[in-house]
Amino acid sequence: MFRTIPFAALIALSACNMTQEVDGSELFAANCSGCHGTDGKGNADMAIALGRNIPDLTHIAARNGGTFDHDAVMSQIDGLHRKEGSPMPEFGDDDLGPIVMVGSTPIPAELLALSGYLESIQE
């Protein structure tokens, strides 16, 4: 698994394989902030309209004993292991950009960038 190398280094290495760098903060603003808020705290108007508690994405690591699990985060975004009935869209149904290789694992560039951005906003 690729967690043995610091994730920031993996993003930098994988960026060498992309023709254009993917900006996780821009992807978040365009695809996630409607529900999770511009700050990732789950307080956007859409969350209120849904009448559901939307997870605070700034505490992913805190909820996981202080560890930010990139595999679990990317799986949640992609929809691979999401619980049935979740109001969150399955972004894996869309094109998540070119594939980059992280070690021997192919990962969509946008999925990798979003996970990196979410790690950067942890409190």
Image: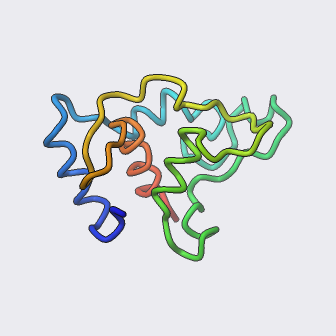
- Residue 63, how many percent across, how many down? 64, 68
In the image, 57 versus 115, the foreground residue is: 115
Q: Is residue 33 above or below residue 64?
A: above
Q: Residue furthest top?
A: 94
In the image, 83 versus 55, the foreground residue is: 83
- Residue 30, how many percent across, how many down? 48, 27
Q: Residue furthest bottom?
A: 65
Q: Residue furthest right?
A: 51
Q: Residue at x 36, y 66 (%)?
A: 3
Q: Residue at x 39, y 33 (%)?
A: 26
Q: Give the quarter of the figure containing the N terminus.
A: bottom left
Q: Is residue 65 above or below residue 19?
A: below
Q: Residue at x 20, y 51 (%)?
A: 12
Q: Tell me: 50 left or right of 7.
A: right
- Residue 72, how many percent across, how many down? 54, 56
Q: What is the total number of numbered labels drawn onto the structure image?
A: 0
> How is colour applied across the structure in the image?
rainbow
In the image, 25 versus 2, the foreground residue is: 2
| Residue 109 lies in quadrant | top left
In the image, 107 versus 53, the foreground residue is: 107
Q: Is residue 108 above or below residue 30?
A: below
Q: Is residue 21 above or below residue 2?
A: above
Q: Tell me: 14 left or right of 32.
A: left
Q: Residue at x 38, y 51 (%)?
A: 116
